[in-house]
């Protein structure tokens, strides 16, 4: 084996030699250099941005410089396990301390720690704050062998966010007891409020902030109107994600169970996951999801945090998430490996009604409810948007998207930006002026009240507006209303869009178990024509066999452009990887990513030297697996 190219820059050298990567991504280099030199840092980077390397590379550099161990605070046991497994694969001495270890193992690791042999130690916050652990840290600190504290998933310290963990609050003690040890906090949560919470609670006022773009360019956003949600989901999975791993989010446990069973019956391997399942079942399902290639996890939001499986190809929402923060975090679990991935959601009137009601009937005080309603409105605006979803998403987080201007905008207004990778950019929806329709709908609700003092639901309202002769219409004599049939020219799906908007904007609200409609005080503004509504024309649901989508599987950018022979090699490599992963008790991607295997299959390295040039092959993996891989490649060819 020839010596690795000489690299003057030690960070670059570690990246290359240990991890087998050729270049830092985004702001990684700046962060690594700042932290390796002993600076404090707050790192905000989207999921998949590469946060781990931001503390792992400094940890290695500082350990090499004799500065001791980096302690990583991590909230999740599964995650610690995989991270340590991955570090083990690249030859970096690392360990975790958590409740899964028995006493002997824990003591062995403590000895390693105190002897200075570990480069990284992962532990849960509650562990770190025990007197025993703090005493060990004291002992290390006295000898200047405490290199760095890295606080991962730092948003857990904020009550504002959705993952608040009480134990995180105690972490300010680290700064108080070890003021000389540099600290970094990392999170993928983008909103400003959470960010300020992290700074205040972890006392990181003086830390340098590294805020990356939160854009996930490889994720394609699509939001469709709910029609037959299960069928729509099935079509999406069959048309675009045959044989892919992905997550389907549902709101209730029952729906999770039903959907998982239904998908399985349709021949799509799927497992349920929700907090009502016992711990053992949850663990088993999560394990299979991490380890298998093509499993669909149908889950409530109980599933997902700390899942760093890189090849999740889609995240589908069958129900509306709580707000944009949740939507972004959940969809962010797709495509961590940078290859094309989908965020797909179906939503409808019932979602809007349910979410509104959950807020209204919740225990929270009025101020909090007001805030939640505002957040829901922002999400609905995203769902109903007829312009670029990405521009809106990033705008919500205070980031201006730097995409292309929409050249043919002839309105003379501010040019619209577009990303080219969301449903609205790929197939711009037509819009229609629904101002008049909204007035008609509201005055019809008003007439119902006036005529018989009764309230009705959305279905009946649309029937009356469209002039449909139903039993109910006859029963209540609604064909005599002045509003009967005044909206026959507007399609039913368009009416549903109008009602969603009116409810979302708070001009209409629903009541009681039948979700009957009622005007609010602000309805008057709409009736007076003061509120202009510009809505998207709902896309016609594509029927089977006539794919109206812009992307069939044919023009989907193939993640692995391999010819037949290379595909055979790729398959052989995957089989080999599966064996290694089982033997080492780690997920397959910890051994090598798909992208790395694909490059091997395509490039067909003949020598260890050639192999070292493939991204993802570091010195340790080259030594451990090099000969084996070359053998598999020769045989697979
Ligand atoms: P995050 O924790 O920010 O979600 P990870 O640290 O898990 O992201 O990184 C996401 C993926 O990107 C990982 O599989 C990692 O190996 C890979 N990665 C990170 N940085 C680089 C880089 N500079 N070059 C190549 N791959 C990288
Ligand atoms: Zn777009």
Image (tube, rainbow, N blue to C red):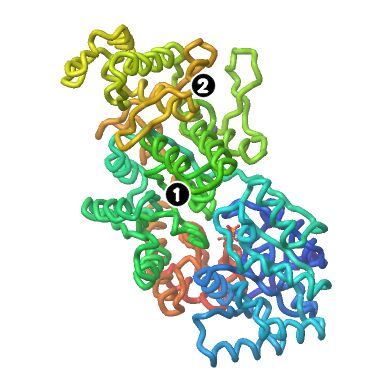
Relative horizontal placement of residue 352, taking residue 371 as reference (left or right)? left
Viewport quadrant of the C terminus:
bottom left
Relative horizontal placement of residue 481, taking residue 128 as reference (left or right)? left
Query: Mark 2 packing: few (<14 Cα in 10 Å), some, or many (20+)?
Result: few
**On screen, 478 above or below 69?**
above
Image spot of residue 480 (x, y percent) = 24, 8
Q: Quadrant of ligand 1?
A: bottom right
Of circles 1 and 2, which is in front? 2
Which mark identifies residue 522?
2
Q: Residue at x 53, y 50 (%)?
A: 329
Relative horizontal placement of residue 237, taking residue 341 as reference (left or right)? left
Q: Residue at x 36, y 47 (%)?
A: 241
Query: Mark 1 packing: few (<14 Cα in 10 Å), some, or many (20+)?
Result: few
Q: Residue tagged by mark 1? A: 561
Label 2 near ligand 2 (CB < 8 Å): no
Image spot of residue 400 (x, y percent) = 67, 35
**On screen, 70 above or below 229?**
below
Q: Residue furthest front?
A: 453
């Amino acid at each position: 084996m020839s010596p690795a190219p000489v690299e003057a820059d030690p960070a670059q050298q570690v990246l290359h030699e240990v991890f087998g990567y050729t270049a830092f991504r985004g702001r990684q280099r700046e962060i690594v250099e700042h932290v390796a030199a002993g600076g404090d840092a707050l790192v905000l980077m989207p999921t998949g941005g590469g946060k781990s390397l931001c503390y792992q590379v400094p940890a290695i550099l500082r350990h090499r410089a004799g500065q001791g161990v980096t302690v990583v605070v991590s909230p999740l046991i599964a995650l610690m396990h995989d991270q340590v497994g991955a570090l083990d694969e690249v030859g970096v001495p690392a360990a975790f301390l958590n409740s899964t270890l028995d006493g002997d193992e824990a003591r062995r690791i403590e000895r390693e720690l105190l002897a200075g042999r570990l480069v990284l130690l992962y532990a849960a916050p509650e562990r770190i704050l025990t007197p025993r652990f703090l005493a060990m840290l004291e002992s290390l600190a006295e000898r200047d062998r405490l290199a760095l504290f890295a606080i991962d998933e730092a948003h857990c310290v904020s009550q504002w966010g959705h993952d608040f963990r009480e134990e995180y609050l105690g972490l300010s003690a680290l700064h108080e007891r070890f003021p000389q040890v540099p600290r970094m906090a990392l999170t993928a949560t983008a909103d400003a409020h959470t960010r300020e919470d992290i700074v205040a609670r972890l006392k990181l006022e003086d830390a340098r902030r590294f805020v990356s773009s939160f854009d996930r360019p490889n994720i394609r956003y699509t939001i469709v109107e709910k029609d037959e949600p299960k069928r729509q989901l099935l079509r999406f999975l069959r048309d675009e994600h045959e044989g892919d791993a992905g997550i389907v989010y549902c709101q209730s446990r029952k729906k999770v169970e039903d959907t998982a069973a239904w998908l399985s019956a349709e021949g799509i391997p799927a497992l349920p996951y929700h907090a009502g399942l016992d711990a053992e079942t949850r663990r088993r399902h999560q394990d299979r999801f991490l380890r298998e290639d093509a499993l669909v996890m149908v889950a409530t939001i109980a599933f997902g945090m700390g899942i760093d499986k890189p090849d999740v190809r889609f995240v589908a929402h069958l129900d509306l998430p709580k707000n944009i923060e949740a939507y972004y975090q959940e969809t962010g679990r797709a495509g961590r490996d940078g290859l094309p991935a989908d965020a797909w959601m179906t939503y409808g009137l019932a979602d809007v009604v349910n979410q509104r009601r959950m807020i209204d009937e919740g225990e929270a005080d009025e101020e909090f409810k007001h805030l939640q309603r505002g957040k829901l409105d922002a999400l609905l605006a995203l769902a109903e948007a007829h312009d670029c979803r990405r521009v809106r998403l990033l705008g919500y987080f205070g980031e201006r998207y730097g995409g292309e201007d929409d050249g043919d905008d002839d309105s003379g207004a501010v040019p619209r930006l577009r990303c080219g990778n969301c449903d609205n950019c790929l197939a711009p929806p037509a819009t229609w002026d629904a101002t008049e329709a909204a007035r008609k709908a509201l005055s019809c609700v008003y007439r119902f009240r006036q005529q018989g003092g009764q309230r009705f639901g959305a279905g009946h309202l649309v029937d009356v507006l469209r002039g449909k002769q139903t039993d109910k219409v006859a029963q209540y004599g609604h064909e005599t209303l002045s509003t009967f049939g005044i909206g026959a020219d507007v399609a039913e799906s368009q009416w549903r869009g109008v009602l969603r908007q009116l409810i979302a904007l708070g001009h209409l609200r629903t009541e009681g178990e039948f979700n009957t409609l009622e005007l609010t005080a602000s309805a008057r503004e709409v009736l007076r024509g003061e509120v202009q509504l510009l809505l998207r024309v709902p896309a016609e649901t594509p029927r089977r066999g006539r794919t109206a989508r812009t992307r069939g599987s044919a023009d989907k950018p193939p993640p692995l452009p391999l010819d037949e022979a290379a595909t055979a090699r790729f398959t052989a490599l995957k089989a080999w990887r599966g064996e290694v992963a089982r033997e080492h008790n780690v997920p397959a991607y910890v051994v090598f990513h798909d992208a790395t295997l694909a490059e091997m299959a395509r490039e067909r390295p003949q020598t260890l030297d050639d192999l070292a040039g493939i991204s993802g092959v570091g010195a340790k993996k080259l030594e451990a697996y090099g000969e084996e891989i070359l053998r598999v490649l020769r045989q697979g060819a």
